[in-house]
Structures are given as C-alpha cells and as structure tokens.
Image (cartoon, coloured by chain):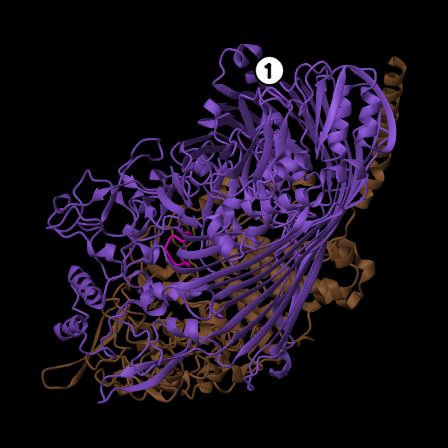
Chain colours: A brown, B purple
Amino acid sequence: MKKNHIKTIIRYIIFSVLITFFALSCKNSLDNSLNIEPRNQLTDASVWANSTTADIFLNDIYGRLFDGNNCWDILDNWTDISMCGLFWPPSKTSTVYNHEYNATNGFEMRTGYTDGTTEPFEWGHQYSFIRKCNIFIASVNANAANFSADWMKTRLAETRFLRAFFYNNLYMAYGGVPILTEALNLNSQGDSIFHPRNTADQTYNFITTELGAIANDLPNTASDYGRITKGAALTLKGYVELFNHKYADASVDNKAVIDLGVYSLYPDYANLFLPAGINNNEGILFRLYLPPALGGRESLRGPCFNNEGVEVCWGGVNPSQQLVDDYAMANGKPITDPLSGYNPQNPYNNRETRFYKSIVQDSSLFGNETLYTRIGIGSLNELDVNERSDASNTGYMLRKGTSPDNIGAQNWNNGTSSENYYFFRYAEVLLNYAEAKIEANSIDQSVYDAIDKVRQRSELPTVETSYGTGLSQESMRSIVRRERKVELAFENKRWWDLIRWRTAEVEINKPIMAMKITKNANGQWVYTSVPAINGNHKFDASKNYLFPIWQSIIDQNPKITQNPGY
Amino acid sequence: MNKLLRKHGNPPLFYQFFRKMKLTILILTASILSCLSAETYSQTTKLTIVSSNSTLLNVIRAIEEQSEFKFFYNEKVDVNMPVSVEVTGKPVTDILDKVLSNTLVKYKVLGRQIALYDKNEMEPFMSEQQERKITGKVTDQAGVPIPGATVIVKGTTTGVTTDNNGKFYMTLPGNAKVLVFSFVGMKSQEVSVSPNSDYNIVLTEQIIGLNEVVTVGYGTQKRGALTSAISVIKGDLLQGQPVADLSNSIAGRTSGIIATQSSGEPGSDGSNILIRGISTIGNSQPLVIVDGVPRNYAQLDPNSIASISILKDAAAVAPYGMAGANGVILITTKKGKSGTPLLSYNGYAGWQNPTVLTKFVNSFQYASLMNAAKDNEGASHVYSEADLQAYKNHSDPNGHPDNNVLKELITPNAMITKHNLELSGGTDKVNYYTALGYLSQDGMWGPTNYKRYNLTSNIDIHATKYTEVSISINGRVEDRNSPAVSSSGIFYQAFRTPPIAPVKFSNGLPGGWIGSSVYGDIFDSGYTKNLGYTLLNQFSIEQQLPFIKGLSVKAVLSYDYNPGDSSNPGSGISSFERQWVTPIPFYTLSTSTTPYTYTQAGNGGPSKPQYYENFTQNQAFTYQAYLNYHNTFGKNDLRGLIVLEERNTKFSTFGASRLNYDVLLPELNNGSSASVDVGNSGYSSEGKQESGLYRLSYAYAGKYLLEASGRYDGNYYFAPGKRFGFFPAFSAGWRISDEKFIKDKLTWINNLKVRGSYGESGALAGSPFQYLRSYSLYSGASVLAGNPTTGMVENSEPNINITWERAKKTNIGFEASFWNGLLTAEADYFQEKRSNMLASPNIVVPIEYGVGISQKNAASMSNKGFEIALGSSHKFSDDLLVSLNVNATFAKNKLGQIYENTVTYNNPNRRVSGRPMGTQFGWRAIGFFKPEDFNQDGSLKSGIPTQSWGPVHPGDIRYADTYGPNGKADGIIDNNDIVPIGKSFVPEIIYGISPSIIYKGFDLNMLLQGAANRDFYITGAGAWPFYSSSSATIDNLDYWTPTHQDAKNPRITSSPAPNNMVTSSFWVRNGSYLRLKTGQIGYTFPASVVQRIKVKSLRVYVSGQNLITWSPIKNFDPEVSDSQGMYYPQQKVVSVGLNVTF
C-alpha cells in the first residue's frame, strides 16, 4: 500500500521535472521565436543605405515648408492691410478683445492652417523640423560611403538651407534662439540637452554664415523643379540681412540674385498666383501643390458668396481700405496726388491693374457674377456691419490667388487647388535690393530700374514719371514701401515689413477701415470709409516687436529666458 | 446526510447542462431515457475500474464518472471500507459482484440507478406487504414536465425516475411515509404519503447553486469551490432581447461591469464594457475569450450563448497573464446533449425609435431669438415682422420653412427582426448543437441598416472510451450599409441646420445650409457598404491517461478568420468595404420671382463620383496543450492544470480608389484612369505570443480552499530578452457554513463563504516595436518636379526597456445564502495598483528636443471599490414565484505619476495627479453678472474680478476667483482659477435591479439599470444658441434678461460670447440615470394545449429595450457620447417574439 503511494509520487515527480526541464530549455528558443520584423517601419540601416531612401527623408522636410495655401487667417490679417471675415479666427480672438499677448497666450499668430503642422512661428514645430535637418546631415555624413559626392554636396546644401530657413522663422519671431546643429539625445547627452538661447546676433550670424557657405554648392537651376537653388540661398540671405538692417550686405546679396540671370518677372500678375502660372521664372523659393493629396484651399480665403447666394468661400481675407487706398491710379500717381484724377465717390475707377487683380470690390465681376458689397439691395455679400455672417467686414474680398473656377465646398474640404505658394519671388528681390540701397542711401539708377521693373509688369509708368525726378531718400523710402505693400499684399510679408521698419505700432494700431456704400436721400450711392466691425488690432511697441515665448517652453527648459516685457 | 439518501458525483457537465436547460431540451433527455431499457444499459455498458487498495466510495465515483450510473445508499453502508478491484471492460454487475463479495453490502440495479444496501436491511422492492401503486407527474414551475426526476421513498433506497412526460408509476412499500422528489438543479421536495394515489409535484429551481459549474480560465470549477471573484450571466437571460449587439445585454446583469452605450447606429451600437471601472491610462478594455480563445463576442448570436463568466480578481485572471489586468469576459457557446433531435425556433420583430432626440426651436422661435440677440447687440433685426409672421403661420413653407430637422429626416419605427433556428441532439457517441441566426436592423433612415447571418455548429464525439473530440465552427456574415457621409457628419450638419433652412423643398429638391445639405448627406451622398466575414474554427481532442488516475491531456487548435480580438492591435474586423461617394447637389430658391425659382446652389460632395474599395483581413492561429489532473484522497481534493499556448495573429489590408467617374457604375475599372485619379494602399503586420500557465487547487473537506495559479507569458511587443513575464496569483476560501457550529445550529444558513485573493497580472501597453529605432513612410509629403513624393518621419525615440503594465490586485469577498435561497448575497471589496503604465515623459526634455522621446513604463494609478449582489426568490404558491436580484458596483480610481506639467501640478486646484482620471476642469460659474455690477459707462465696478474673455455685460456668466500667482485670489479670472468642475464621464456607480414574477403560464421580468456619480459636459450646438452658425435648442429659450435674471442661460447673442463659452461648471450636467433597460412579458401555453398542435412548447412574449429613462437631463440621452449631441442616438425598442420547440 505504502509502496504504491511512493510509486505514484515518483511518477509525479518525474513528470514535473520533465515539464520544468522542457519549459526551461525552451526559454531561449521561445524568446527567439517571438522575433518578428516590423513590416511598415524602416530602420537606420535601411534608411541611410542609398540616396533613394535618404531622399525620402528629405522629401518630408520639404513638406514642412509653411503650407501657405491651406490657411484662412493669413499673417496679413494681423496687420493694417486685411482682416478676417469669419467669426472666430485667431487674428480676431487674440486682438479684438484686447487680448494681451503673454507667455500663457503666446502671440497666437496662427494662420488657421488646417492641420497646423507647418505653422511658421511655432517654436516646437520649427525645432522638430530642425531636428530632421540635423539627423539628415549627421546620418548622411556618417554613411558617406553609401552616397555619391555630387548627391551629398547638393542634398546637404539643400538641407542646411532648410535648417537656416527654419531658424530664420524663429529669429524673426523671437530674436536669439538656441542654435542646435545636432539632434538632441537624452541618453547620450544627459543634462546638456538643455541649451540656453543664443543671442540675436549669434543667431543672425549662424543663418547668414550657413547660407553663405552653401550657396555655391547649390545649382542655379534645380534638377527637380521645387528644390532649393543657389538663388534661394542668396535671396534668403539678402532678406535676413535686410531684416537685420545690414543694408550693404543686403544690397550685395540681392544684387547677386539679380545677376544670376535666371529669374525674370512673370508677365501676368494674376496668373502668377493661379494654376496657369505654376511654371515660371519668377519664383525663387516656393511650395508646390498637387491635388488631390497635396492641393491647396483657396476657398478658405476668397469672396464669400456667389452663385445666387451659395457660400463658395469662407472669406478668410478682407482687404482693408488702407490697402485699397495705396493702389495707384492707372496713370501711376497715388490717389493722394491732386492730379491723379481720383474721385472718392467713384473710387474704383481707373486704378492700377494690380488692384483689379488682387481685390474684389463692390460691383466687380467675379467669375460671371457681379458681386455687390453695397448696403440695402439684399446682397449676401453686403458689407457685414454687425458680424452677422462670413461676408466681408471691409467691403472688400480677396481675388489674388482665387479663381472662380476652383472655389466651393469641394475645394475647401479637399484642397483641389494647384497654384504655388511663394516665400520669395523675383519681384521681392528687386524691391529688397531697392530698399537696401535706399536705406544705405546709395540711391542710383539701379534702384529706379529695380522698382520700375516691378511697376512695368503691371503697366504702370516709371517712378520718375509718376512721382517726379530728384526724389529724396525719404520719398524713395515711402515709394518703395508703398510698392511693396501693394505688390506683395496677402503674401504674408506685411507683418515682417512693419517689424523691420519699426512702424508696426503706427500702422497696426489704426482701426481697419471698411468701405460703406449706402444710398442717400437723393437716391445716390455714397461711399464712406468707416471703421470695420471687430477691426481693431493692437500693437504694444514696448514689447511686441518680439513674440513672447510660451510658458510651456520655459517650463520644460528653464535655461530659456523670456523676451523683455512679457 | 442523516436519514436522507445521499447522491453525489454528478459529472459537472451533466449538472451544468440541467441548470441551464431550456425547458424544451429536457424533453430530449427524456427520450434518451426511454430509448434504452434498463437492462440494456447495465449490460451493454462496459467499464474498466482499476482501483487497488482504495475505498468503496472511490469505486462508486469511478463508475459514476465513466457511466451514467448513479448510486444511492444510506448511512448503514460503509462506503469508506477498503476494497480492491481490477476489471477491464466488464458490465457494472460484474464489477459490483467482485467488489462487494465478502462484504455486508448488496446492490440492486434499477435502470441507471444502483442502490446499495446493508444485507441485514430489508432489500428494496422486496417489501410486498401493504404495498400500493401510485402515479404522478413532476413539472417545473412553468408546468413543463421534468423527465428523469427521482422519486424515492424517504429512508429507503426504493425509487424510480420519471419518464419523458414527467410521469412516474411506483409501487409504494407499506411503511412508506414520505416521498422525496429531486432533480439536478432543482430543490428537492418532500411530500407526505397520502391516501391519494395521484401526485402532481412542481419542483422549483435551486438558487443556492453551489454545485453549479462555472467556466473559469482554461477550465471549469464548481461555484462552491471558487476562491476568486467571478460572476456569471446565463445565456437564457440574453435571449429575446431586441438588441443586435451582445455587449448591450450585459450592463446591469451582474456586479462588476461598467457599461456605456455610446451610439445607436446599426452595426456599431455596442457598449463600452469596463470591468470594475478604469485602472489604467492605457487601453482599459477587458480581454474577451470565446470558447477558450481570444475573440470578439459582440456579434455572436445571443441564442447560442450558454453562459458568460466575468473574471474580476487576480486569482480569476491570473491564467491570462499579460492580457488579464483589465478583467476577462469568458463566453461559452452551447453544446449538444444526447437525445432525439430537438428543433426550436426563436424570433422577434421590433420597432425602434430614438430614446431622446435633442429638441430644437421652431422657426418662429429661432427668428425671434435672433432678433432678441440683435437687440442686445444694438444691431438691426435680421427678421422682419413679415418674416416672423410667415414663420409662425407657415404660409410660405418654401420661402419661410419651419423644419424640425431631425424629425424631418427620421423614419419612425425602424424595424429590427431576428430569426433563430436551433437543432441539437446526440447519441452515445456524438452530440451536436447547431444554430442558424438572422438579424436585420433598420436604421433611422433608409440607407442605414445592418444584417447579420450567424451559423454555429458544435460537435462532440466520444471517439473512444478515453477520447473526446470536439469540432466547432462559428461563422457569420455582417452586412453594414450606410450613406457615404458618416453618421457623425450627418448629425453635425443636422444640428447646425436651423429650422429656417430648407431641408427639402416642396418640389422634392434638397435645400442646403453652409455649403452642404443634410438631406443630401443621407439620401444623395452615395453609400458605404461593409461586408464583414468571420469564421471561428476549433478542433480539440482530449485523452484520459488511465495509467495515472485523474490525468488527462487535451490539445486545442483553432484557426480564426477575423477573431475581432480587441486585445490585439490592428485586429479590427475582416471586411470588404465599398464606398461610392457622389456629388450632393443642393438648391436655393429665389423669392424674387413668382412662382419661386430654384437653382442648384452648390454641391456638398465631390464634383464627380468617387469609388473606394478596402479589404482587411485578420487571422489568428491558437495552439493549446493541456495537462489536467483531478483526484481525491480521502477528504483532500486536488486539481492541477498546466497549459502551454502559442498564438499567432496576422493582419493585412489593401485599398484601391478611383476618382472622377463619368460612367455611373461603381466599379474600379469604370473610373477615370488619369494617374492622379487612381490610388491604392496597403500593409500587413504580424503578432505572436508564447505562454505557459498553471493552476493548482486544493480543498480539504470542501471547506478549506486554496488555489495558486499563474502564467509565464511572452509577447513579441518587447525587446529580445525582455519579452517574458511571470504573473502569479494566490487565493483562499473558507466555507464557514460547512463548519459544525453553523451546520448544526444555524440551519437557516445554507451557505457562507469568505474568500480572498492577491496577485499580479499584466496588460500590453503602447504599440509593438517601441523598442526599435524606426522610421515610418507616408505618401504625399511634398511636390517635387511636378510629382507627389513619399516622405519619411522618425518615430519616437526607442526605449529598449519597454515592458507591460503591472497590476497588483487584492480582493476580499463573501458569498452567502440564507433560508433556502430566500436571500443570497455576494459582496466584494477590491483594490488595484497599476504601475508601469506607458507615459511620455516629454516634460523632462526641452521642447527644442524636436521628437517625441520614448515612452517610459513609469505612470501609476490606483483603483478601488466594492460590489454587491443580492438575490431573493420566494414561491408564494405553486402558481406564483417572485424573485428579485439587485447588484451594484462602485469603483473610483486615482491617478498617480503621469508626468503632469508644472503649471497644473503646482496649482492644487488644477493638479490632475491624485484625482480620478477624467475629472473635468474649468472655471466655476457663480451665476450671472447683474446690472448693478457695472458702472454707468459699462465697465465693471471696482472690486469685481475681471474676466479675460472680452468685455462682459449683465447676463454674462461670472466665474469664481479662486487662485492667483501667489496662491491667493488675485482679482483676475484666468487660467489660475481653473478648478475641478465635474466627475468623469465614466460612472463611479452602476447598478441593476431585476425583478421577475412567474404566475401560471405568465412570466414577467425586468431589468432596471442605472448609473450615478457621473458628469458630462455639453458644448457647441448642444449648449449655445447660434454657435458656429447653427441652430438653438429649446433650452436656449430661457435666457437672461434684466427682468428674468434667474434664467437657465446667459444673455442671448447672435453668436455665443467667448466669455460664456469657456469651459465652466455652468455647462456640466449630472449624468446619473436609471433606465428600464429591458422588460419582458411572456406567456407559455400549457402543455395540454400545445400538444394538440404537435408542438412541444410554445411561448409568446412582448419585450422592450431602453423603455423608460429617468435622468436630470431631458434634451439628451444620458449616455450621450458627444458633448454637442451630434451622434446617432440610442434606440428604444419594443418587440414581439415567439419561441417554439418542435
């Protein structure tokens, strides 16, 4: 009896030992049997193995260039030249209600970009793009054996350009920022991942030095249309120099772009911003669009109602009376000139062509329909005096870059537009050159030539014909600034121009003016300039020349110091 | 056991089967009994008993386990006497002859019953004196006959069983005083012998259920021997409810489950089920196991469910290791039972309507509100008196419509129908269960509907005496149809469309509002058709190993096409989806002409049709090897289990699209072939898991229970060398009621058990391959050289140490039953500490870092609560049985480390850590600004804190000043003043009350289900009038004016003032509710009636779902899933149904 029990127990023990042994001996092979290669991810080894996959990494960085054609609250809406017609755009919520810009709210200069990932002045975004550039540069260098020398030269230069471009976004907005030229790594760098801000000068020097160093590595004409060229590097360099009031340098670099001889003005100012003008010799740095996946949405910005009352655009951009007043007469003279022939009660008559190509005004044709902003005839586009709808708050709507053929819900939902978005185009280089020379007070014929070239494209007489000869530096300054305001309107340039000229508090603190057209007692239509509803912007010169740094940035890196006044 | 005859050792399955029987199935058992005559069985059944140096009791048990024989004996028989027997393949009589030779015990075989008696006692059936014949019938409380019930003369071994009509014929010995009627799963009944010779006995169901067999992880266990927290929902409770998705039938049925149904859309109206609340910031979904394998259960046919076990504590979930931390739902499908084929039909037809539809203002109210808003703003009226009149008197339905937009679109009384056919039966060698189900559920509008076809087939083959083979095939096809615009898109547009906008003109043309047409979104947008395929295949073979008593091995192989297993990422449903997206034209009318003219005003869809096809495939391969042991040594009961498991999952998907169709035939080949119009995509992935698990249970005298279980679990998610984890649990129980001091003195206590468990389980966190440095490709990065490019992004920095979540769970509970089931109670206290949750500690690096740093297993959280279930059942007379079950669960969690940023962490009011997850934060509203708060010039009087959302006016919401930079109120209402304003959307308390009454043939049962300690937040179009050009709800009519200052809403403005839209307690609503979730009244026709129409049983019923809802909220369903109410609402269903068994 006892013996049998023991026998059973021994059986159990042997059995358990076998099982345990089996389990233990399996452990390693079990672990290995769980090896599975991910199939929808790539590893370092495969990415930097050849130029084809490395290019894919760079394609992504190109896509991080500001997606300007998918915005509805463009930067100009924070300035004197336009405002947003919608109810709750960032440009209104942060200013109309006297929002103080501060570390908590930030500057809230957000463009209503539909997914927000390329917001140009978002600290975190720009640094994530900079990281991509740093990884590309380091990885390509580390795997140099896998690439051809030519490919490396060009691609590294492109990437360094893009990095400088992202740094420039930060520099303009915040002044000095931490200059990181290699990807941060918590594991290997420890506490040294916390970098303080570099000074504004260091940041400026970094940008210009980099651009200077790579310019000659870049081709005059890109192998693939849309890639960075030598012209782009010199243009950005010249622009930053102008921004930093380094006028001599700026004139040299802008002149160098002109002397490249690869750029010319596209003959049709309207088509330049429409699909018809995609391929041109005027664009220097631009983002390309290609529907369906990579299309733009001009209907976010264009005129609201069309087609018997259908909302065809959101009306994100309402040009101001201030801007309209700066369009010259067709004879080249400003409307303030008594000889210009301007009639305030027939204000849209005989204006320069850029006016008609940029702005939709009362009684103008859009597509095959005449739009009315005048009050009292039941038009849905009637001037919105109490913020009742998306209709214009100024009596003006955006025509530049908006085609009646493209717009509608389909466009604002799906991005079906293919026109380019320009960061820099040749017309600006000409104006940058002129401005640099004027500010350096070395005004010569080349200055007149540059401005006249821009005016001639839009069928305007020369500066001297329009304004007379023997113009002072002061006059030339206001001429080039007016030219710039008109030529580059709605291209997200105005804010930085006002910052550069230190005139932001003057221009931005003026209320946005609207054109109110009403019938008087005699049955005549009367044009009156009135403040637009919710058109007040505010700019505090004591601090607003630099953006505040968001508190969360400082919270996560205590070495970052806030800008003065915030 | 005193004087009563003792009976024991019913094989668990047999018992379980009868506990769960549908009355109809009983009849089949009866037929087996009548098929085989007693002699045949005792002679044809050959048994092998090898039991040397054992006891008589063990031999009896061995015979019972191998056969259908049952032994009866009284205390005179010493079953513990030592015996020795070794026979192979002999009839039972041979064995007993051998065993009982040289003993005082004799036996007698009566069919399948064997009586043992002391040879000195009178032999049963030998007493001929004064004997008389009696007859009778045994039925259940519904009047259905019970075949196979035992009738025994008390104090003797004399007895018979009932035939398949529940009838018995018996010769009573002269000294018979009392008859004992018993049947498995029923309460035994003693009846005094009366001069009457006809006995009609009604047996009631036994509620104590200690012998009920409960499905546990990788096995079964008797309820009385459980040491873990497991609740069971029986399949029959789920049947006949007019709901498509099984998950909606679980809420309120048992304690421990927290369920929220977030949508009523056919085909996607399932509830989100949580077991004991939320314990993790990661995935909180429980693991779902169907017939032993991870699979989705929601779309199984409720009729083929045998039971649902909810595994709640560490001891219960330990066998699931790295997947068990959120609890486990075990589904068991029905199996066949020997007997003649039994065919039954169950079907119902129901009518669905939304439980609550948000009520919007009518046109006149809308226009008046807008004018009032303009008055407030000093602006001119938008609507003239003539407009108002036209809206009011409906004189101009096209130019001045008055639409109740949702009502206009919804077809009331959408049908839901279900048909189910079940066939089951079997022979000695093969049992089968097969069922066919069809469900059709219409949506609130024509294009939306759901159809489901289920096929279940479970076959069990007793291949040899020691071998059992089971084959199970469970398949379904799901057909989901909806407009091309998603329901959220439709409701978005419906909520925005004000009553003054034309939904549809009288000539049938659709109208529009802000660039799209809600009518067109539903009826003209094309379609989405999703065909889902599921096929769950399982083969198992179980082999007894007679050389070690009680040892068996089992192998299970399963191949699932579309397991829909929620614990595996990417394992959505395998489906083929086709989407046809068409232009959605809409029209405006010009009132300047007579008659009005209509022109196409726009198009809410693409300019030309588009067509998409998507194919998704999920497969899972599961291999399990079991080693099972169960033996008894005297009073010691020992069970052991070892399982090795491997699971492999495969996922792949691809899609194709064409745009710009000129030919209106939705096939890929018919679309534009321009390269920009052609698209495709696809990828695949794979997953793998290797595990070994064990369970050891020991019981002494059925009183002292101990269990240890655990799993060694490895998953491909993690880095080599860091893939395997060990998850053990221990539990113990004490059946106090079996102790002498209760058993003898407190006889009203039928059962009292305390139990406790502690253990560790795990949960997968994050996503696979987080340990690898990797890059992901995406299409459409940038345009270069006129072509779209592919782009690549660096994924978050890898973390080689990434691992699973750890959950340490403690549970203490008791189970009790008093006064023979008049009161049953079960209560549990639980607490859990979850650690190693993945969190992104991004705050430890500067924002300049530029990429997400790897997650770390560093977050922690705790969750605790209790749950209670009470039951009572009382039979007032033979005709009236009343029962009531109540359960409630309370669970509250608390966040620990979550890498909160310093801004909120340093403000005690805003700190998220240490508060329950989902706590809502915002400003505390303290009423409205009053006119006297302002100076003459409209500025706020000094001393009143200023608010930072623009100028305020009387009637705007005023917020409390609670905090400032120095920790004190600072006169400025800004982010510092944010405080907790509401509880989580997930209820802390959930409860169910289910009364039931059975009176003669009628049965009534209800389920009231409620939730409390829950808040939700309303915003947007659901809260604010004219928000984003949308409409206004009837609640908005009650707005602040100087003469109506105690209004429900702030002053009216033509678009909501930003000050009034900030997140504040003003818009927090109490989300408590109680609803009559299910109600059913049935009538079972008497057997005498149905037999005339050659039917075995017939029941008709009326059933309802979500019939009544009590909630402080009137304008939303309290389970609302969208803060604006823009979602497909839950449905109220009333149905009529029929069960027939042939």
Amino acid beneath label 1: Asn
Q: Around disc 1, counting alpha carbons within 10 Å, would you say few (fewer than 14), some (14 to 19), or many (20 or more)?
A: few
Residue at the image position 82 percent from the left and 18 percent from the top: B83
| Chain part drawn in magenta | B1120-1129
Residue at the image position 49 percent from the left and 48 percent from the top: B1087
> In the depicted view, which residue is nearer to us: A239 or B279?
B279
B270 horizontally vs A7: left or right:
left
B665 horizontally vs A547: left or right:
right
Residue at the image position 59 percent from the left and 16 percent from the top: B3
In the picture of the structure, the residue carrying the numbered disc 1 is B2
* Figure check: A167 above or below B655: above
B1053 horizontally vs B845: left or right:
left
What secondary structure do most residues of the magenta stretch adopt? Answer: loop
> In the depicted view, which residue is nearer to us: B949 or B800?
B800
The total of numbered circles placed on residues is 1
Q: Quadrant of residue B941?
A: top left
* Figure check: B829 above or below B145: above
